[in-house]
Amino acid sequence: MNPHLERWLRFAREDLRMAELAFEDGIHNQVCFHAHQAVEKTLKGCLEAQGQAPPRTHKRADLIRLVRGSMLTDLEPQLLKMDRFYIPTRYPDALPGMLPEGWPGEGDAREALELAREVLRRITEERL
């Protein structure tokens, strides 16, 4: 595996593990945040493996467009939807309405966790 990608994936796997632990404890906002981080770091690792400097952004929309030949094209709608978790899972005074139901619930957490697992699985199997 590309050493640049592996460096990013190490951090992504740790975020995924934190998301799993938070899910076990029912801390859904932290599941969503760490799943978001796992995906972000995976995408940034892909960019670096392709010789691109990862931009300093947390938005999936910015990152997914830059990853060439992505095996994640079919997941793009879900990946873009994850951006809704970044601000409200970090700050208690986030803009009202970012998550219509308030804090992320169990369904949001499960969806975010499954998506992060799938992204890591696909990129690991791709062996950039």
Image: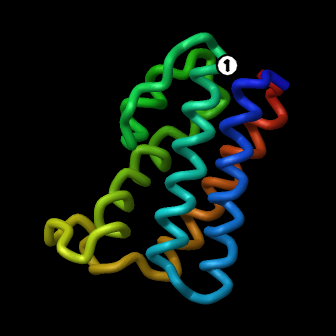
Q: At x 77% / y 21%, what residue is drawn? A: 128
Residue 13 appears left or right of 40: right
Residue located beneath label 1 in the image: 49
Residue 1: % across, % down: 85, 25
| Of 77 and 105, the residue lying toward us | 105
Residue 111 appears left or right of 33: right
Residue 103: % across, % down: 34, 79
Residue 120: % across, % down: 71, 45
Q: At x 47% / y 63%, what residue is drawn? A: 33
Q: At x 40% / y 76%, what residue is drawn? A: 104
Q: At x 82% / y 26%, what residue is drawn? A: 127
* Neighbour tally class for label 1: few under 14, some 14-19, many 20 plus, Cα within 10 Å: many
Q: Quadrant of residue 19?
A: bottom right
How many numbered circles does the render carry?
Answer: 1
Give SS at disc 1: helix
- Indicate whether 80 appears above or below 5: below
The residue most toward the top is 51
Three-letter amino acid code at the position of disc 1: Ala
Q: Quadrant of residue 22?
A: bottom right
- Indicate whether 48 appears above or below 16: above
The residue most toward the bottom is 25
The residue most toward the left is 96
Figure colour scheme: rainbow
- Indicate whether 69 appears above or below 114: above
Residue 27: % across, % down: 52, 83
- Indicate whether 36 appears above or below 92: above
